[in-house]
Amino acid sequence: MPLKESMFFHRLQHFSPYSGHLYDALKVPFIKKRDGVFGRSDSRFDLMDREGYFPFLELLRDGHVYFISDEDLLEFLNITEDTLNQYEVDYWPGWNIDFKEQLAKRFTEGYEQGKSDFEQNLGISYAALPYEQQLPYLRAFCLYCLDFLFFEGDLVDTLFYNLGYLQASLYRGFVEINHLLALSPDGNAAIGLHFESYNKRRELAGKDEPIAPQEQPTINEKTDTTRIELLCDISEIKKVWSVLTEPIKTKNGTEAAVFSKTDLQKFLGTVFSSGAFPDSLKMADYTAVKITSRGDMRNVLNALMYATYNINREFNRSTKLIQYATILKKYFAVFAGSGTESIKSVIATHAPKGLDILKDSVTDNPHIEEMLQILKKHKLLH
């Protein structure tokens, strides 16, 4: 599928699917390094040579992780008060770190919206394509993102929003490619997640030397196969499940906290994993079966697990709902009498009932409001 035949992001303001970013002014403020320049490079397209891996650098801001492919863009976003004097800015009187932070905020706003709009931008035809056509379609989508995903120093509010939007779109597209490769009969199911810059490795290896492919991790009998890989924001999953560390009102009275904070960390580390951030979900050996009241609490547990499934499914579609249902049956006695297929078949139906129960405990449980905001962000609650 030739790249030039595909056009995306028709709904993105201040962006033309033909020519890219649109500016309202002919002359705009711009920033430059005192010892170099910001600029586009064709090497950004080399990222597509790293299929099967995850060649992004991470940007941590306000407890959230943003995955960045462009080194110049990342350098700008990481400017601090201490490093501000390493750059010069033209046509922006009084430039300071606060203005830089305003642009960084616009980037993260665009990033969040880009993540949310991913399926819509792919178009309605993508889901109907057979596997052999989905991969080239996604590659064209990612290459299209890279065509406009560079930072040359222009300091324009709408540009940073667009760059965030495109960066998130590229990130989600690349993850989707890796998922399809993992599911392919001819592919390697052990997708390597390497949060490092491909361009940085090129610099370290020497610009004229080819970059040797990294070895895929070896799978042996000790490799854990029961934990579900979380490719979403781990902090959001922790916040969702934190509602179980405080009391919850039910029709049978107030249910005591199901977990202590320590036990919750052990439980999450036992059932979920993160190849990217292993220290955030340290592997544990939690074996206790939690006993709760029936009825309302069963619905609450359904709601939490179904929310986890949907949030993670944005990035990891290789894990099926029945695997999440298996966790409920194994660790919560209230599901002991049900088969995993039965739990799976009704979890979507019972989840809204569980959310209604949690809403009634907002004033007594400090974690519920934050959980509801996370669900609204992912359009799981309206």
Image: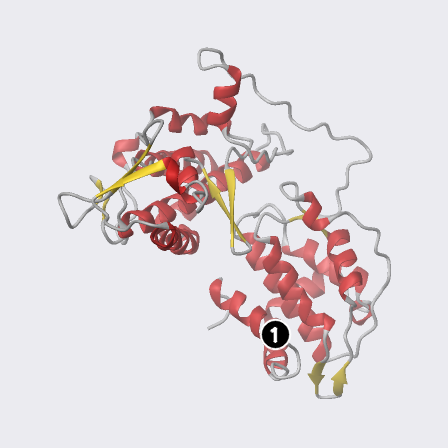
- Towards the viewer: 184 or 214: 214
Q: Is residue 311 above or below residue 145?
A: below
Q: Is residue 246 above or below residue 158?
A: below
Type of amino acid under label 1: Ile
Q: How many marks?
A: 1
Q: Where in the figure is residue 118, as x and y percent of width and height? A: 41, 50
Q: Classify 10 Å Cα crowding around label 1: few (below 14), some (14-19), many (20 and above).
A: many
- Towards the viewer: 6 or 186: 6
Left or right relative to 246: residue 68:
left
- Residue drawn at x 65%, y 26% is 216
| Residue 94 visible in the snapshot | yes
- Towards the viewer: 276 or 105: 105
| Residue 123 visible in the snapshot | no
Q: Residue furthest top?
A: 208
- Residue drawn at x 47%, y 38% is 174
Indicate the colouring scheme: secondary structure
Q: Where in the figure is residue 191, as x and y percent of width and height? A: 61, 34
- Residue drawn at x 69%, y 53% is 323
Left or right relative to 50: residue 30:
left
Instruction: Label 1, secondary structure: give it.
Output: helix
Q: Is residue 69 above or below residue 353?
A: above
Q: Where in the figure is residue 17, as x and y percent of width and height? A: 24, 43
Q: Is residue 14 above or below residue 223?
A: below
For label 1, the residue is: 368
Location of the N terminus (image quadrant): top left
- Residue drawn at x 44%, y 36% is 69
Q: Residue furthest left?
A: 26
